[in-house]
Image: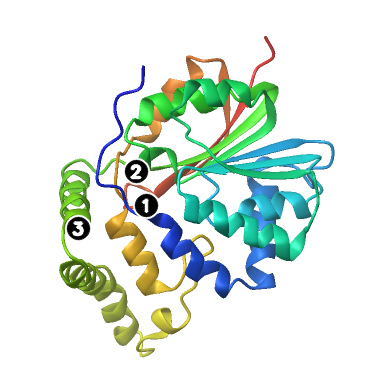
Amino acid sequence: MAKKKLSPRFKFGNNWKKFIEKLSDDQVHEAEQSLVKALGFSSLEGKKFIDVGSGSGLFSLAAMRLDAAQVHSFDYDPDSVACALELKQKYFPGDTRWVIEQGDVLDGGYIESLGKWDVVYSWGVLHHTGNLDWALGNVSGLVKPLGKLFIAIYNDQGRMSEIWQRIKKIYNKTPIVVQWLIAAGCFLGLWAIVSVRDVLMLRPFHTYRNYRSLRGMNSWTDVVDWVGGYPFEVASPERIFDFYRARGFVLVHLKTVQGKMGNNEFVFYRKNG
């Protein structure tokens, strides 16, 4: 049985609402290309795609535009579910290939009811469930033989990750005013080095002015998403590799943050049988 999920939880859906308000065609295209590049498919024609922790719904939308035969999006946060529904209404109204619902990746019965999929996608989600190992195991059960699993998990930075976990826990327990002060302090700290570098290169605030995150919003809301993101767990690339190798998966794509803060990205191929 999965251990009880931790409380309090960060409401990711609030940030995703802001994101989809300004979602551009260029960002949708970039999402499509990131799937194509990592998965090694020129399209998803004839393939079933499930988005575990769909967030804004952007990558479910990308899968639809890549001609997936079926797309299933689910998220624990009802506001995130609402975001995906809004994107579907805008781009694919009434299309029965795309199903969106609220669901919990830690619910084994629910996961089993979803069946098997050609592509299982869960980017930056499983480490926010409160039980990373259980979530990693549950998503593996969704992948059909010869299918692919595309996940991204926060990198283990040792002591620094422990500090961030404390900051995130405190953030989610404090009033809004205090949350704003914590986020502001983290924003200044995270952007200080980049800003100094830009000044030394005689292009002050260049990075800040040109910043755009595919999965986040702008620089401020991305920092809020990072600071508030709790529950919070991390894993080394070796831990993720060993976990899935033991379950019959082969690593076919790896993109790490080279020991820094952020998500390591993996694509695994499930062997037949």
Seen from the viewer's position, the closer of residues 9 and 240 is 9
Q: Residues within 10 Å of mark 2 (few under 14, many from 20)?
A: many
Q: Residues within 10 Å of mark 1 (few under 14, many from 20)?
A: some
Looking at the picture, the colour scheme in use is rainbow
Quarter of the figure with residue 49: top right
Q: Quadrant of the N terminus?
A: top left
For the point 55% across and 26% down, which residue is it? 111
Q: Earlier in the sequence, mark 2 or mark 3?
A: 2
Give the residue pinned by disc 1: 262
Mark 2, secondary structure of its residue? loop
Residue type of the residue flagged with mark 1 = Gly
Q: Residues within 10 Å of mark 3 (few under 14, many from 20)?
A: many
Q: Quadrant of the C terminus?
A: top right
Give the residue pinned by disc 3: 171
Whether residues under marks 1 and 2 lie with C-beta atoms below 8 angstroms apart, the answer is yes
Mark 3, secondary structure of its residue? helix
Quarter of the figure with residue 249: top right
Mark 1, secondary structure of its residue? loop
In the displayed structure image, the side of residue 214 where residue 39 appears, left or right: right
Camera-side mark, 2 or 3: 3
Point out residue 18 in the picture as x, y percentages from the top left corner: 48, 70
Residue type of the residue flagged with mark 3 = Tyr
Whether residues under marks 2 and 3 lie with C-beta atoms below 8 angstroms apart, the answer is no
Seen from the viewer's position, the closer of residues 259 and 217 is 217
Camera-side mark, 3 or 1: 3
Q: Earlier in the sequence, mark 3 or mark 1?
A: 3
Residue type of the residue flagged with mark 2 = Asn
Q: Earlier in the sequence, mark 1 or mark 2?
A: 2
Return the mark for residue 155.
2
Point out residue 262 in the picture as x, y percentages from the top left corner: 37, 52
